Image: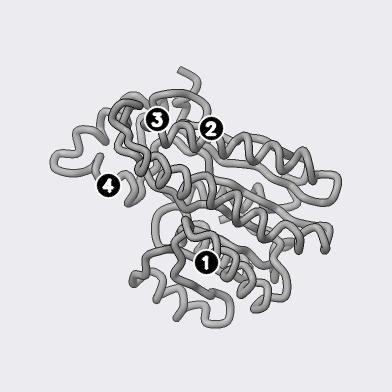
Amino acid sequence: MANYPELIQQHAFITGVASGIGHAQAVAFLAQDVAVFGIDRHVNPMITQLQQQYPQKFYFEQVDVRDAQAISDSVAHAIKQFGQIELLLNTAGILDAYKPLLDTDLASWNTILATNLTSQFLCAQALLPQMLQQQHGVIINMASIAGLVAGGGGIAYTAAKHGVIGLTKQIDYDYAASGIRANCIAPGAIDTPMNAADFLGDAKMAHQVALQTPAQRWAQPEEVAALSLFLASSAADYIHGSVIPIDGGWLEK
């Protein structure tokens, strides 16, 4: 993992830290001596392991990111714990089983958008005043190739991830001159628990996805975490309002 000394002793708020990309981001940032306040609706042994390994650096709260009050409370707790937050990584998300419009009911639509899009709005809105006060803040939102093309998800997931890109660009446009830098990452096929169904049985779906990807493989969440570190670092200071694909060439087809 690359070393970013400018991140040492900074503080990150990360959603979705119990598994997948969010967990990999927490591990990567902790390894760079960044204190992490993580939230997730699940608690598992990986969370316990981080708490034991980094007792003075990793703090966790069980939070459903669809709960606006819970997010507000957790952000307040994080600021009280650390004094300030320089880095926000909005990573929590769920899939929608590739359901098209006529197979998607309103409850499912609301759940997908609340988890994948509104939670990012809420976290950014809660943390932005403090970032503006210190005239520095980096926001890294998790989009998807489904935010750039159709077919990467169903109607709700695709709409939500397109929304993440718009949210990110507008945040950066509105606040870049005040020291805020917002970008988003657009992953393709990443081997995480969220995609576990593709690997069931003989993993036929996983093999098909790999064959359709120019790089001929799935990526690991640690690769997305490495990109997140770069985007958080001063090396990316002139990257603003951008969508960074990490998709093995999927979008070039």
Q: Earlier in the sequence, mark 3 or mark 2?
A: 3
- Amino acid tagged 1: Ala
The x and y percentages for residue 246 are 51, 36
The residues bearing labels 3 and 2 have C-alpha atoms spaced at a distance of 11 Å
The residues bearing labels 3 and 4 have C-alpha atoms spaced at a distance of 20 Å
Identify which residue is drawn at 44% across, 49% down: 93
Badge 4 is on which residue?
A: 196
Badge 1 is on which residue?
A: 70
Helix or strand or loop: what does disc 4 sit on? helix
Q: Earlier in the sequence, mark 1 or mark 2?
A: 1
| Mark 3 or mark 4, whichever is nearer to me | 3
Q: Earlier in the sequence, mark 4 or mark 2?
A: 2
- Amino acid tagged 4: Ala
Q: Earlier in the sequence, mark 3 or mark 4?
A: 3
Badge 2 is on which residue?
A: 162
Quadrant of the drawing holding the C terminus: top left
Circles 4, 2 touching at the beta carbon (< 8 Å): no
The residue at the far front in this view is 106
| Mark 4 or mark 2, whichever is nearer to me | 2
